[in-house]
Image (spheres, grey):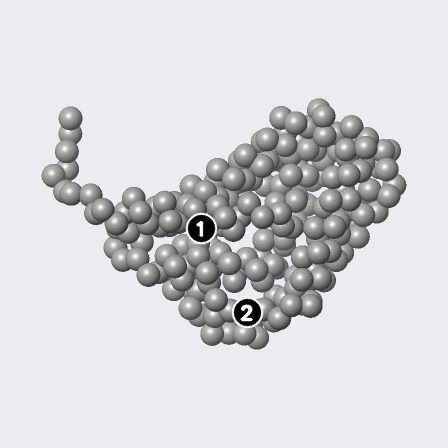
Amino acid sequence: MLSTGLPLDPAVPTALLQGALMMGGLIVAIGAQNALVLRQGVMRAHVLPVVLLCTLSDWLLVALGVFGLGALIAAQPLLLEAFRYGGAAFLVAYGWRAARQAWLGTAAGLQIAGSGGSLGGALTTTLALTYLNPHVYLDTVVLVGGVGAQHAGAARLGFVAGAWLASAAWFALLGFGAVGAARFLRQPAAWRAIDALVAVVMWAVAAQLMLTPLKQA
């Protein structure tokens, strides 16, 4: 058996597990981004690109947070306020679109499900739901990044790797799990319920942004 002769830093496995658990706990909560991935999976439309974009965005934000951006954002409350209002406006508009589709019912929903929309549209919406949400910066960059930055050397890299693994596993499970269940979820009643859920989630997040002052970690 090959050996490098270098002992493994005992802090690395602990940091990796900490990163995975922390990221997993934050990402599983139903939010705007998760609702979009679920919907794309049910539509069986551009699932892989959307899952990859969400995963890569998380990877980028985690790395930036751990290696310094988190502290910078925490010191710029005006930047967070700009994302707060812009993100809330976008979520209200997207929620209205989903609510309209739920209200129109079977014909509109199944037509959209069959077409799937354009790849560019799906990726643009994914980018907006990811980067216009100030909680992404508070949670992923400031909170996760702040904890990861407390580690040093290989342990810091282990923390980042754990967070990355949790993100990749979750988005793959959510998107492709919805693909597997699409035959059942695309029944007319289920489709309207999914659109209604998406609308409620979008509006709930928008209301939270507008009514609750952002608190820095």
Q: Residue at x 15, y 29 (%)?
A: 2
Q: In which quarter of the image is residue 69?
A: bottom left
Q: Mark 2: which secondary structure?
A: loop
Q: Where is residue 189 in the image (x, y as percent from the top left)?
A: 81, 32
Q: Residue 22 carries which label?
A: 1
Q: Is residue 167 visible?
A: yes
Q: Residue at x 40, y 54 (%)?
A: 63
Q: In this view, does 88 lie to the left or right of 141?
A: right
Q: In which quarter of the image is the N terminus?
A: top left
Disc 2 residue crowd, few under 14, some 14–19, many 20+, Cα 10 Å: few
Q: Position of residue 48 (x, y in %)?
A: 57, 35
User: How many numbered badges does the structure rendering display?
Assistant: 2
Q: Position of residue 14 (x, y in %)?
A: 31, 47
Q: Mark 1: which secondary structure?
A: helix
Reading the image, the residue beneath label 2 is 215
Hey, what amino acid is under mark 2?
Answer: Lys
Disc 1 residue crowd, few under 14, some 14–19, many 20+, Cα 10 Å: many
Hey, what amino acid is under mark 1?
Answer: Met
